[in-house]
Amino acid sequence: MGLDNNFYIEAALICVKIVVTSGWAGEAFRKALRGAEVYVVPVLRLTPVEVDVKAVEEAVAQSDLVVFVSGRAAYRLKELGAKLELTGKVVATAEGAKGAVMVKNAYGVEPQLVYDTSEDLAKALPGCRRGVVFHHGERAAELVEVLEVKCPVAEFYTYRAVPDEETIKSIPPADVYVFFSALAAEAVGERRPELIKGALAVAAGPAVERALLRYGAVVRRPPRGRIGDVVEYVKRLLEELR
């Protein structure tokens, strides 16, 4: 009986060490890169922050475009009792179908603009009179920069991403490091520069790429920043390198 191609791919990945710095992406890498040693090391942790609910309600009431970078922001606002009337507004999310469901569950309105990354959403933003952006963890800087050209923007956070010092200390040496966040890249670069300088790092997005380059990494960036696309890109990259 012949062996299928997956056998040879898995055999080639034996002893390859990959560090994935986002916890929510880890399982996808483990499933796709069987044979490799995949270390899932979430270098950032989310902490809820105080939200001025009245300011949020007023900003949304005055806007015609509302962006939830993550649907979790909508859930958090609902938990805090924020009354948001989204009917008649352009509602957007950068968390794909999952984020759209969360926004609808929280406020009864299905987003019209549904994209998997803030970079992709930024390219699709329409003109507006006034916009509101609810960030998740870290600032979606490129999205805001694009939106500010179109209209005034109010920005809010429901969670902040902060470096997890102990987790960063525990990052093992690896053949490839994968980053989905510029803040994660900066957190590791500042605290563990010896890991990043000269290392092969995969950046899910241009902002992540710029951060890694500042710390001397050898950076590869997939065309798209969705988890599935990054996983496939890393898989092909490792096949090329072996």
Image (tube, grey):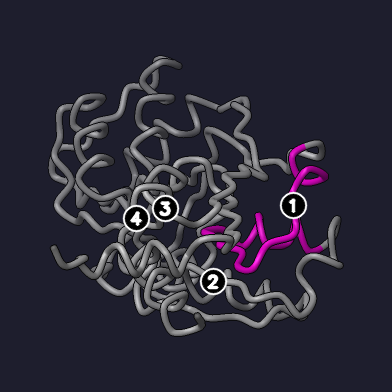
SS for dot 3: helix
Tell me the residue at 79%/65% (across/down). 195
User: Could you tell me how far apart the alpha carbons at marks 3 and 1 are, in whole angstroms?
Assistant: 17 Å
Tell me the residue at 39%/49% (across/down). 69
Q: Residue 27 carries which label?
A: none
Q: Where is residue 186 in the image (x, y as percent from the top left)?
A: 73, 61
Q: Which mark is residue 202?
A: 2
Query: Magenta part of the protein: which range?
Result: 167-189
Which residue has dot 3 on it?
A: 29
Amino acid residing under circle 3: Phe
Q: Where is residue 79 in the image (x, y as percent from the top left)?
A: 41, 15
Q: Earlier in the sequence, mark 3 or mark 1?
A: 3
Which label sits in the foreground, 2 or 1?
1
Q: Between 128 and 169, which is closer to the camera in this rendering?
A: 169
- The crowd level at tag 3 (other Cα within 10 Å; few <14, some 14-19, many 20+) is many
Which residue has dot 4 on it?
A: 32
Q: Check if mark 4's residue and mark 2's residue have beta carbons within 8 Å.
A: no
Amino acid residing under circle 1: Pro
Q: Earlier in the sequence, mark 2 or mark 1?
A: 1
User: Could you tell me how far apart the alpha carbons at marks 4 and 2 are, in whole angstroms?
Assistant: 16 Å
Q: Which of marks 4 and 1 is nearer the N terminus?
A: 4
Amino acid residing under circle 4: Ala
SS for dot 1: loop
User: Could you tell me how far apart the alpha carbons at marks 3 and 2 are, in whole angstroms?
Assistant: 13 Å
Q: Check if mark 3's residue and mark 4's residue have beta carbons within 8 Å.
A: yes
- The crowd level at tag 4 (other Cα within 10 Å; few <14, some 14-19, many 20+) is some
